[in-house]
Image (cartoon, rainbow, N blue to C red):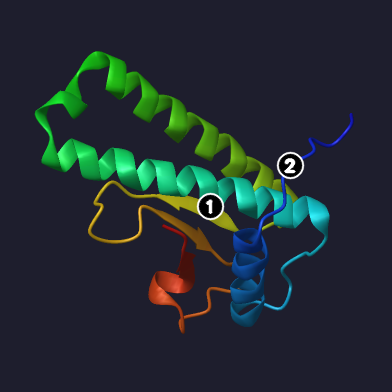
Amino acid sequence: MKAKVRRITGRGNQILGRLRELDHSAPGGEQMIGLLSEIARLATRKHKHDTDLCNYEWASEPKYEAQREACRTELRALGEELTAMWPGSRLCLQNDPRGFVVRIEVPNGNKEAWAGGLGIA
């Protein structure tokens, strides 16, 4: 099966650098950076959706809820891909926009980071 080609962004490089500070076992390469870039893009979208839900009545309408669920589904799939690429890591989804709504937990359980992981958005 051919690996999915993703757009590599500076944000993906930045996240990989921060993950490697927490756990030196983090894999590198274009595939990992592309995956992290995609996670960052969707994490920003999820943060906006969760903020809208807190602030606007229209955000609880079925059409917008379907968009929110599609974003969460995509993030869960990327989380499974991350775990397959880096065993022991985990993508955690939160719903409170006052903090990080997407966080990556590192395999070594580094406690220097908030809750043993890295907040994305």
Label total for image: 2
Residue type at mark 2 is Arg
Residue 107 appears anywhere in the view: no
Mark 1 = which residue? 40
Q: Quadrant of the N terminus?
A: top right
Q: Is residue 26 above or below residue 101?
A: below
Mark 2 Cα shell of 10 Å, populated few (<14), some (14-19), many (≥20): some
Residue type at mark 1 is Ala
Side (left or right) of 60 relative to 1: left
Q: Residue at x 38, y 24 (%)?
A: 67
Give me the C-alpha separation between circle 2 and circle 1.
Answer: 12 Å
Q: Residue at x 79, y 38 (%)?
A: 5
Q: In this rendered view, identify the residue nearer to me: 24 or 51.
A: 51
Side (left or right) of 37 relative to 97: right
Mark 1 Cα shell of 10 Å, populated few (<14), some (14-19), many (≥20): many
Residue lying at the far bottom of the rendered structure: 112
Q: Is residue 107 above or below residue 90?
A: below
Q: Residue at x 39, y 74 (%)?
A: 114
Q: Is residue 103 above or below residue 76?
A: below
Tell me which corner region of the image, top left, top right, bottom left or bottom right, holds residue 66: top left
x then y, percent, for residue 2: 89, 32
Q: In this rendered view, identify the residue nearer to me: 68 or 94.
A: 68
Secondary structure found at label 1: helix
Mark 2 = which residue? 6
x then y, percent, for residue 50: 27, 42
Residue lying at the far right of the rendered structure: 1
